[in-house]
Amino acid sequence: MNISPLEQNSMDICAEEGDKPTVETNTSCGTCFSSDVPFQKKVDKLELTRTYEAQHTQSDIMLVSEFKQLKLEKEAQKNWDLFYKRNSTNFFKDRHWTTREFEELKTCREFENQRLTMLEAGCGVGNCLFPLLEEDHHIFIYACDFSPRAVQFVKQNPCYNPDTCKAFQCDLTKDSLTDNIPADSVDVVTLIFVLSAIHPDKMPLAVENIYKVIKPGGCVLFRDYGFNDHAMLRFKTGNKLGENFYVRQDGTRSYFFTTGEFC
């Protein structure tokens, strides 16, 4: 399997942070308000990041109790189902950047208009699935998610068509993908903000599961949270589960990767 490079800063966090619309600077002519002071912006962001890192280092010591960690693992599916019950299809934005960011979706074809078979592992409510099907008419996508409610939302989408996609519920760490997908049949697998939601000890099980359905020489497109990005630095005391592994207030969890883990 070929794995594309890890993106250190997640698209989700970049969208949340954004750039400040104006920057105030003092000049010899008085006070100037400018919307285009790139150097000052970089300095401000660097100082903010250092502040976050310092605060995070001081509070990032105490681990969540073993009892609570076991409870979170046991209720992982329930917590994601409740997440989609609260947010429906409104939380994540559609990922129209997929074909732009992952050129492999074009270059992996042996000839133009070759029909690709894909697996989107962790499809959520279809924020990546449906934009891909809209942009590329020579593709069939298997889409699975841990949450039954998320899969239900996918199937209820007016764009859902059994001729171009198949959605099903699956725990990548224990449910065999070959129950729904023929072995060695998938050209491309997408893992976009998915592995981070799995306990680090169980990540190898998910990867082995995917290996069963991907063709020899197939491609895995990976994007996820990176170590020390803003999502990680915002966690307060009492949210740490282990090395680079944290729990949110709603019980969903997130791991933050380093590039060295994929070398």
Image (cartoon, rainbow, N blue to C red):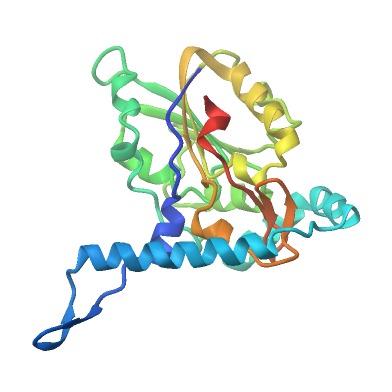
**Residue 234 visible within the image:** no
The image position of residue 215, as x and y in percent, is: 51, 13
Query: Which quadrant of the view contains residue 233?
Result: bottom right
Tally the marks: 0
Q: Which residue sits at x=56%, y=13%?
A: 184
The image position of residue 51, as x and y in percent, is: 50, 67
Left/right of residue 201 with respect to residue 167 in the rendered view: right
Note whether 23 is above or below 261 in the view shown. below
Note whether 242 is above or below 88 in the view shown. above
Q: Which residue sits at x=63%, y=63%?
A: 235
The image position of residue 191, as x and y in percent, is: 52, 36
Query: Which quadrant of the view contains residue 145?
Result: top right
User: In the displayed image of the protein, which residue is found farthest to the top?
Assistant: 216
**Depth check: 215 or 185 in front?**
215
**Depth check: 221 or 260 in front?**
260
User: In the displayed image of the protein, which residue is found farthest to the bottom?
Assistant: 30
Note whether 13 is above or below 262 in the view shown. below
**Residue 42 visible within the image:** yes
User: In the displayed image of the protein, which residue is found farthest to the front?
Assistant: 28
The image position of residue 252, as x and y in percent, is: 68, 56
**Depth check: 143 or 26 in front?**
26
Q: Which residue sits at x=40%, y=58%?
A: 14
